[in-house]
Structures are given as C-alpha cells and as structure tokens.
Image (tube, rainbow, N blue to C red):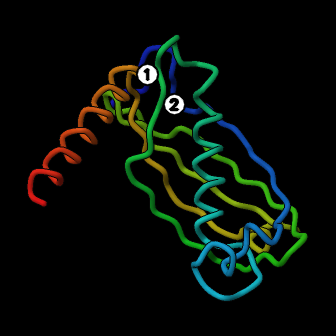
Amino acid sequence: MTGEQGGLVIGLRATVSAEVTDADTAAALGSGDMPVLGTPRLLALAEAASVAAVAPHLTAGQTTVGTAASLEHRRPSPLGTQIEVDAELTEIDGRRLVFMFIGYGPGGGENAVIGAGTVERVLLDRESFLARAVGSASSASAASSASS
C-alpha cells in the first residue's frame, strides 16, 4: 500500500450535492416502491464524488473505473431533501484506489448521516480500456452468433 500514484495522493476529496427528485427514488430506480432516495442513486452520488476527487489530478488519457462498492443506507431521504456526499481517497494500492464516503442530509451529527461506505476504482488508460471492451464485446457477439 502506497500513499501516491502519479499525481494522486491519499486525502484527495470532493463533495457532490443533489436534491432528491422523482427520478432519484427507489420506486423510479426499481430498488423498491417508496418515494425516497433509492440506494442506487446514493451509490451513484458516491461514485461521482470519488471521480471528482481524483479527476483534476489525472494525466491526459487516464481515467478511473469502478470495480467494487460497499454501502450502508441508514436513513430515508424524501422528495425535496438536499443531500451531500463527501468522498475521500483513503488508499492507493498500485492502480487500485479506495475511497471512503459519507452521505449527509439535513440536521447535525449522526442524525444527518444518510449513508456511508467505500468505493473502489482502478486507474487506467482510457483508450486501451475502450479497445479491450470493444474487442470483448465483438468476441462475445461472434461466439453468440456461431452458437445460434
């Protein structure tokens, strides 16, 4: 475990904000039938904050992709709730980046925490990744056609 990878260092942070809308609800996202912030949307905000934390420090052609996540969704957030998700880069292990995140709603202290967890992303070259992805999709499509 190192504390640096190119221009990335442990401690990089970012915050994203959102207001819970109909499109963000569990009912809209298929993760339940309640008109409250859906867990997939909380995870998407955590991913966005993680991306924002490192994006300004990447070199041309670099990007990160998500590989794992763990989250605890602790409190409901109804329509109209303003939320913030803070992410911090806490571990660098080669190309593997680990972020800790906390989602906050209104209130103070523990009552404001709506969820928390970790996001793992991998640092990679954008063009090489896309070439492999397209190659994999083409191979899978050809194999599927051949077996039909």
Q: Which quarter of the picture shows residue 93? A: top left
Q: Residue at x 70, y 79 (%)?
A: 75
For mark 1, what is the residue?
A: 4
| In-front residue for pair 111/77 | 77
Q: Tell me the amino acid under the disc marked 1.
A: Glu
**Left or right of residue 112, residue 144 in this image:** left
Q: Residue at x 87, y 62 (%)?
A: 82
Q: Position of residue 100 (x, y in %)?
A: 54, 50
Q: Position of residue 66 (x, y in %)?
A: 44, 45
Q: Tell me the amino acid under the disc marked 2.
A: Ile
**10 Å neighbourhood of mark 2: few (<14), some, or many (≥20)?**
some
Is residue 5 depicted above or below 134 in this figure? Answer: above
Mark 1: secondary structure: strand
**Left or right of residue 51, residue 22 in this image:** right
Image quadrant occupied by the C terminus: bottom left
For mark 2, what is the residue?
A: 10
- Estimate the spatial distance between the alpha carbons at disc 2 and disc 1, rounded to whole Å: 7 Å
**10 Å neighbourhood of mark 1: few (<14), some, or many (≥20)?**
few
Mark 2: secondary structure: loop
Q: Residue furthest top?
A: 60
Asked if disc 2 and disc 1 are in contact, CB closer than 8 Å, the reply is: yes
Q: Residue at x 38, y 25 (%)?
A: 124
Image quadrant occupied by the N terminus: top left
Q: Position of residue 11 (x, y in %)?
A: 58, 33
| In-front residue for pair 12/76 | 76
